[in-house]
Amino acid sequence: MARKPALQELQKLVSRCAAAILYQPLKSEIDYNNRSFPLEIPVNNLVLPNNKNNDPFEWAANCIAKFQNINVYILIPGTRFDRYGTRYGQGGGWYDRFLSKVPATWLRIGITDKSQMSAVKLLKQEWDEPVDWIVVSNNNLWEVHKINANQLLRSKEHGKASLN
């Protein structure tokens, strides 16, 4: 069976990454350790905490120091996503602050369940950091959505306000 073009393109991009930044899945989040997960997880990785009390700016600085001059992808959970790259999290802005400090060249991949994909465009705040791709679980089958480059560029330019 042939793979869908978006999945093939994302897998090719991920294969060029020497490292990954991962999350500790909460019970409500997709566990990428599932054998059916369609992306390769490199040995060289770092797992972000699922504790809101950790400083996202400190974690961003640690990730930048650890992964200097190499291609990195970031798996990002959320409670809601749309096809424009807008992501809603747990409401504290932790990932938005973290993503605002890491290199824009690092591949941002949202991970969600089909039930959490919005059919309509979500309200995007100025501090919201978009994702480049969304991997959607549908009963251990996977859909991949590439975010339109022009929309993403506008979103990234619009979303650079400080959350301090």
Image (cartoon, rainbow, N blue to C red):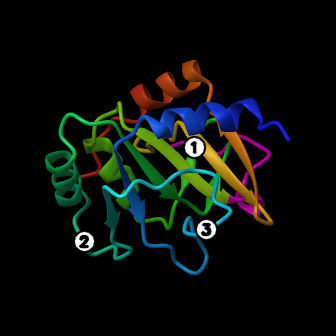
Give the SS element for disc 3: loop
**Mark closest to the chain's N terminus, 2 or 3:** 3
Badge 2 local density, few (<14 within 10 Å), some, or many (20+)?
few
Residue 25, image x and y in percent? 50, 73
Residue 160, image x and y in percent? 34, 35
Q: Which residue is mark 1?
A: 86
- Residue at 49 percent of width and 30 percent of height: 155
For the question of whether residue 148 can be seen, the reply is: yes
Q: Is residue 35 magenta?
A: no
118 sits left or right of 85 in the view = right
Q: CA distance from mark 1 to mark 2?
A: 23 Å
Give the SS element for disc 1: loop
Position of 11 relative to 41 (above/below)? above
Screen quadrant of the N terminus: top right
Give the SS element for disc 2: loop
Which mark, residue 77?
none
Which quarter of the picture shows residue 101? top left
Q: Which residue is mark 2?
A: 54
For the question of whether residue 123 can be seen, the reply is: no
**Mark closest to the chain's N terminus, 1 or 2:** 2
Q: Amino acid at mark 3?
A: Ile
Which mark, residue 30?
3
Q: Amino acid at mark 1?
A: Thr
Residue 113, image x and y in percent? 70, 62
Residue 74, image x and y in percent? 42, 49
Q: Amino acid at mark 2?
A: Asn
